[in-house]
Amino acid sequence: MRYRVAISGREESVVVEAGPDGGFTVTLRGRTYVADLRRIGKSPLYSLLVGARSCSVAATRERTQWRLDLEGSSFAVSVETEQEHAARAVDAERASRAGAEVKASMPGFVSRVLVAAGDAVVKGTPLVIIEAMKMENEIRAECAGVVAEIAVSERQTVNNGDVLVRIS
């Protein structure tokens, strides 16, 4: 599997493949390494074997990243799959656009429209309530702007992907 790894602010593409013996191979910057990583009890310590070199690594989760302590050096590391990285880039691009179409993320029934054309909204403003499977789901603005159009009305049935609100 391909990952994007940021180590102390430097981003790398890494391929990790499981090996038949429980170990794995890691490809980084065109070089392939055979490795094995085992947790030591229930502690944050791991035994890491890369080729013939062995060392201990302490791994501690810190919000959205890991803190790795290896042979006296400490590193901040974040890891995401290539798919997560691409999705995050698309989300960032979408959020930066001046306008957006807010679409239904599920089929359901529009129980309430919370805004009107001309209303100013910020990212996260509740726009519409869709009832699906006896649950109310609040659909929120993905960006700041002005409501240009309400494309649905209360008591209307919508499908996944239907435009609910246009923001400019």
Image (cartoon, grey):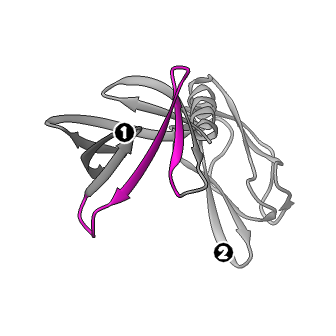
Crowd band around label 1 with a 10 angstrom C-alpha radius: few (<14), some (14–19), many (20+):
few
The location of residue 137, given as percent across then percent down, is 64, 64
The location of residue 145, given as percent across then percent down, is 58, 30
The location of residue 62, given as percent across then percent down, is 28, 49
Residue 86 among magenta residues: no
The rendered magenta stretch, by its main secondary structure, is classed as: strand
Q: Which residue has dot 1 on it?
A: 52
Q: Is residue 72 left or right of residue 57?
A: left
Residue 121 vertical position relative to residue 97 in the rendered view, above or below = below
Q: Nearer the viewer, residue 9 or 157?
A: 9
Q: Amino acid at mark 1?
A: Ala
Q: Is residue 154 left or right of residue 168?
A: right
Residue 89 vertical position relative to residue 121 in the rendered view, above or below = above
Give the SS element for disc 2.
Answer: strand
Q: Which residue has dot 2 on it?
A: 135
Crowd band around label 2 with a 10 angstrom C-alpha radius: few (<14), some (14–19), many (20+):
few
Q: Quadrant of residue 92?
A: top right
Q: Amino acid at mark 2?
A: Met
Part of the protein shown in magenta: 22-44
Q: Residue at coordinates 23% horizontally, 64% vertically from top-left?
A: 43
Alpha carbon distance from label 2 to label 1:
56 Å
Q: Residue at coordinates 32% horizontally, 45% vertically from top-left?
A: 66
Q: Is residue 72 left or right of residue 51?
A: left
* Furthest residue in direction bottom, as rendered: 134
Q: Is residue 155 left or right of residue 126?
A: right
Which of marks 1 and 2 precedes in the sequence?
1
Depth check, mark 2 against mark 1: the one in front is: 1
The location of residue 40, given as percent across then percent down, is 28, 63
Residue 42 vertical position relative to residue 114 in the rendered view, above or below = below
